[in-house]
Image (cartoon, rainbow, N blue to C red):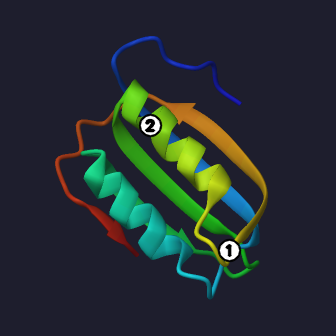
Amino acid sequence: MDAEPTALAARVRARVYGLVQGVGFREFVRRHAQALGLRGWVRNLPDGSVELEAEGPRPALDELLRLVHQGPRLAWVERVETEWRPPTGDRGWFHVR
């Protein structure tokens, strides 16, 4: 994995494994990411995992990742893999793909 950025703005891609599809996980991530002022997306993958990419202030990304590890009430998060990337300046809303 890449080294973690030190600048205020950052981008992270995360892949979440466990019981994370069919339990409202994507909507959970979207709602919290928007509340934190983040930009990016979240989507289901064919193997049953969920992938997300988010950009914004590092403290907000850290909080989103904390929430992702917790997940919604019906989810069971086995593990979360993260990869820090340089920010792209994306200006779109956080959305479900």
- Count of marks placed on residues: 2
Of pointers 2 and 1, the one earlier in the residue sequence: 1
Horizontally, residue 26 falls left or right of residue 40, namely right
* Callout 1: SS: loop
Along the line of sight, which residue is nearer the eye, 53 or 35?
35
In the image, farthest residue toward the top:
6
Which residue sits at x=43%, y=74%? Answer: 27
Quadrant in the picture for residue 20: bottom right
Residue drawn at (60%, 50%), measured in percent from left and top?
Answer: 14
Q: In which quarter of the image is the N terminus?
A: top right
The circle drawn on residue 65 is: none
Residue 97 in sight:
yes
Amino acid type, residue under disc 1 in the picture: Val
Q: Where is residue 56 in the image (x, y as percent from the top left)?
A: 31, 35
Q: What type is the residue that disc 2 sits on?
A: Leu
- What residue is shown with label 1? 20
Measure how far apart labels 2 and 1 are at the Cα level. 19 Å
Return the mark for residue 61.
2
Q: Looking at the image, which residue is at 33% across and 17% down?
A: 8
Q: Crowding near pointer 1: few (<14 within 10 Å), some, many (20+)?
A: many
Report the front residue among 49 and 68. 68
Q: Disc 2 on helix, strand or loop?
A: helix
Where does the image place residue 29, in percent across and percent down from the top left? Answer: 46, 62
Tell whether label 1 touches label 2 (CB within 8 Å).
no
